[in-house]
Image (cartoon, grey):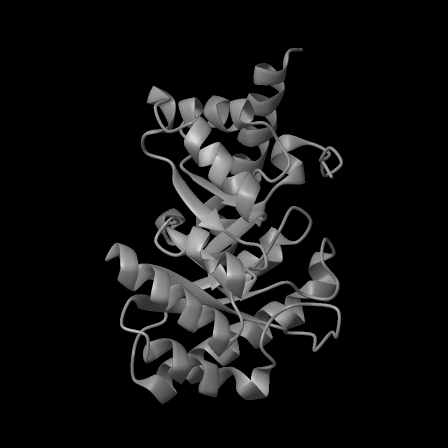
Amino acid sequence: MNRQQELHERWQSVKERLASAVAASGRHPSEITLVAVSKLHEAADIATLAALGQVDFGENYVQEACAKQQDLLLNPACQQVRWHFIGHVQSRKAAQVGGAFALVHTVDSAKLAQALEKQCLAVNKRQPVLIQVNIGAEEQKSGVMAAALPALAEQVLACPHLDLQGLMCLPPVFDNGALARPYFAQLRALRDDLSTRLAMPLPHLSMGMSGDFAEAVLEGATLVRIGTDIFGARPPKKL
């Protein structure tokens, strides 16, 4: 089996499993977007999946993401691709991110929000964003603590070129749906409370990966980030 066939079969299998999860949740398929997490995989893999109809791709590293965007800029299969930034963004790299992605999932500080605002102002673009919540209060992970979420949301809303659309999380026990599900439920509750507090819709919940996306869908995920089940094992990051 060549690489194109492998990707087709993996992608189709994920789509079928996602459709089953959506059916079990009683929701409409249009409510959930599959984001194929392509970090550390070749741009050619993205082109292959784009030609099959995959639209949304998630990248974690700024330099790698920008290089792939440039590589695929003129590829006919990739003209409809929507790029998502799903990794931690250092404020000093915000100039490469602001205005360059369909959605930035990982705003976790006022400093980053302000850096993105500065860049978006400079290029006259509005940047859709999600706030990343450190749902398990883990010291080693990025994300705002739940108690500080309302204050950060207000700071994001004070940036006229940022469009706050919801929340994102990475639970402590990823790839184990039963153990991750309570964290997904907690993120949904935080989103609902924040939406009420701000008196505005926050339509998106970015949560769920290869091993736990079915439970995330049951708890209201609108964006599921799936990498390994589509692309296979990731190659080591180049130094």
**Res 117 seen here:** yes
* Nearest to the observer: residue 54 or residue 152: 152
For the point 31% across and 73% down, the residue is: 201
Q: Is residue 175 above or below residue 162?
A: above
Q: Is residue 117 above or below residue 151?
A: above
Report the number of discs.
0
Please indicate whether residue 148 sits to the left or right of residue 139 in the image. left
Q: Residue furthest top?
A: 1
Q: Is residue 206 above or below residue 71?
A: below
For the point 53% across and 22% down, the residue is: 44
Q: Position of residue 81 (x, y in %)?
A: 38, 36
**Image quarter (top left, top right, bottom left or bottom right) of the N terminus:** top right
For the point 49% across and 75% down, the residue is: 111
* Nearest to the observer: residue 92 or residue 52: 92
For the point 44% across and 84% down, the residue is: 193
Q: Position of residue 213 (x, y in %)?
A: 60, 52
**Image quarter (top left, top right, bottom left or bottom right) of the C terminus:** top right
